[in-house]
Image (spheres, helix red, strand yellow):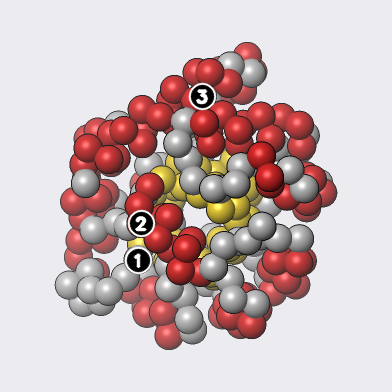
Amino acid sequence: MSFSKEQVLNIMRSTKLVPLFTHDDASEALDVIEAAYQGGVRVFEFTNRKKNSFEVFSQVQKQRNRFPELTLGIGTIMDPETTKKFIDVGADFIISPILKPSMGEVCGAHGKHWIPGCATLTEIVTAKEHGAEIIKIFPGSVLGPGFVSSILPVVPDLNLMITGGVEPTEQNLAAWFKAGAMCVGLGSQLFTKDILAKKDWPALKEKVSTALSIIQQLK
């Protein structure tokens, strides 16, 4: 099961929410993904932040038939070698907190989105020149919606994903989408410590569904 670059971009544009999550236990990771999927999520970023993230991601990929409409990518990738490693086990897209064009070369060779993290206009334009069709604005909480609304008149055709400090509230989400964000990434604000500790998957499903509902109302 795989998705084309066009399909990934269209899903991001449509749902406008990219949850990001990691766990060192594949079974619990699958429970979280399933709750998010049932809540309406159709694009998901699993982050490479645990010592066994590759093994967990590989196991999750083997269960992809449980989520037929879900495009699943990997985040927190920092080099071309790791990029290739995760593409080989089925990652639909690669997200990085940094700008490293050599990662873009690997993604381009395999028909996958390279979504680099950028914090300046120079980085954004450089990423675009090296083939990035979606650019991650990070950290969002530091840069703010004003940064996005200021750069879009200069480079108007950007597909921007905002990550870092985004909140699942109408006020915060409205500010980002009004500024021109294509989609937002949400992590700990969705996958709260309380929900994870209790393994309260119905609550997670409801939290995700509420965030998506707010986003759809803002369109």
Q: Give the quadrant of residue 32.
A: top right
In the rendered structure, which amino acid carries the disc numbered 2?
Answer: Arg
Mark 3–mark 1 Cα distance, whole angstroms, equals 28 Å
Q: Secondary structure at mark 2?
A: helix
Q: Report whether 26 appears left or right of 115.
A: right
Q: Is residue 89 above or below residue 49?
A: below
Q: Secondary structure at mark 1?
A: loop
Front: mark 1 or 2: 2
Of all residues, the one furthest to the bottom in this rendering is 129
Q: Position of residue 99 (x, y in %)?
A: 52, 72
Residue for badge 3: 204
Residue on which the image places disc 1: 159
Q: Residues within 10 Å of mark 3 (few under 14, many from 20)?
A: many
Mark 3 and mark 2: Cα distance apart in space: 23 Å
Foreground residue among 45 and 205: 205
Residue under label 2, please give it: 13
C-alpha gap between disc 1 and disc 2: 9 Å
Residue 146 in view (yes/no):
no
Instruction: Indicate the amino acid at tag 3.
Output: Leu
Q: Residue at x 65, y 77 (%)?
A: 110
